[in-house]
Image (cartoon, rainbow, N blue to C red):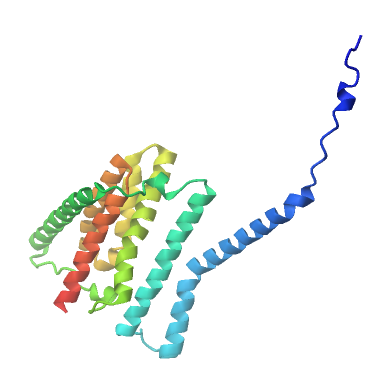
Amino acid sequence: MDFNPTTEEAQPSAPAQEPSISSPPRQESRLLLRKLELLLLLGLTIGPSLLSAAYIYFVYGIATQRPYGDSYIFFKLASGIVHEVGGLALLCYILFRQGRKLRDIGFSFRWRDIPVSLGLFLLAWLACYVCYLQIYYLHFFWNGRLLEPWSNMSSILGTHISIAAVLFILINPFFEELIVRAYLMSEISSWTRNIALAGLVSVAIQASYHLYQGLPNAVSIAALFAVFSIYYGTNRRIMPVILAHLYLDILGAAYVFIRH
């Protein structure tokens, strides 16, 4: 015998959810996200080239030779700033889409990062110097001629300090170390379970885009970056590496500005 015959009938069924109530906000948010993605993509890939073309056309016209001078160096720095800020924004977006944050690839600040970064700076500079010294004497014994060091940083930063140069110097270590060190190494090591391979790839990529300084300098810089990669691979913290890179850039820029 059923003593509770009205149990099922007494409980009214829950009203069916109407998808039309929540779908418009979701569609609007998705549309906004797609617009932001498009702007980010165009700003990063097309923005620097567009700025460069517009600058050369309106300032130099249809130039028959490569533009030069302080104004062009200033523009190149500004274009580099746009490119690097866009790259960092893209990194943040990729991490966001993956449900991660910069902290997940080792980006956070602790006060002890400062003394650690100073130690990294000295060790990396020493590794670079010793490597260059070996190349210098090897070149001399092989060719009987002294190796001329690369000293054309003024073509990148100019001969005098400027707002654009300062901003570029401050942004560049974050751009290089977060993307080519922290993110790249964390991704490769997660795929291969081989942190040594990840560090090797990171160093090779960073050294390769310094080839404009010549092969001896690029190889010497590779030794410097190897110190950074070993530290990050061991500790998975990128802030001391960023600070050490910043010290090196400031030292190089100060040398250029003071010399001129």
Horizontal and vertical percent position of residue 198: 35, 45
Query: At x 48% / y 66%, what residue is drawn?
Result: 44
Horizontal and vertical percent position of residue 172: 33, 63
Q: Can you name the residue that lies furthest to the top here? A: 1
What is the quadrant of the C terminus in the image?
bottom left
Which sits in the foreground, 205 or 105?
105
Position of 124 compared to 32: left or right?
left
Query: At x 34% / y 82%, what residue is drawn?
Result: 72
Horizontal and vertical percent position of residue 76: 36, 76
Position of 241 compared to 45: left or right?
left
What is the quadrant of the N terminus in the image?
top right
Q: Is residue 50 above or below residue 246?
A: below
Tell me the quarter of the picture where residue 65 sits. bottom left
Q: Is residue 73 above or below residue 131?
A: below
Q: Is residue 62 visible?
A: no
Q: Is residue 160 visible?
A: yes
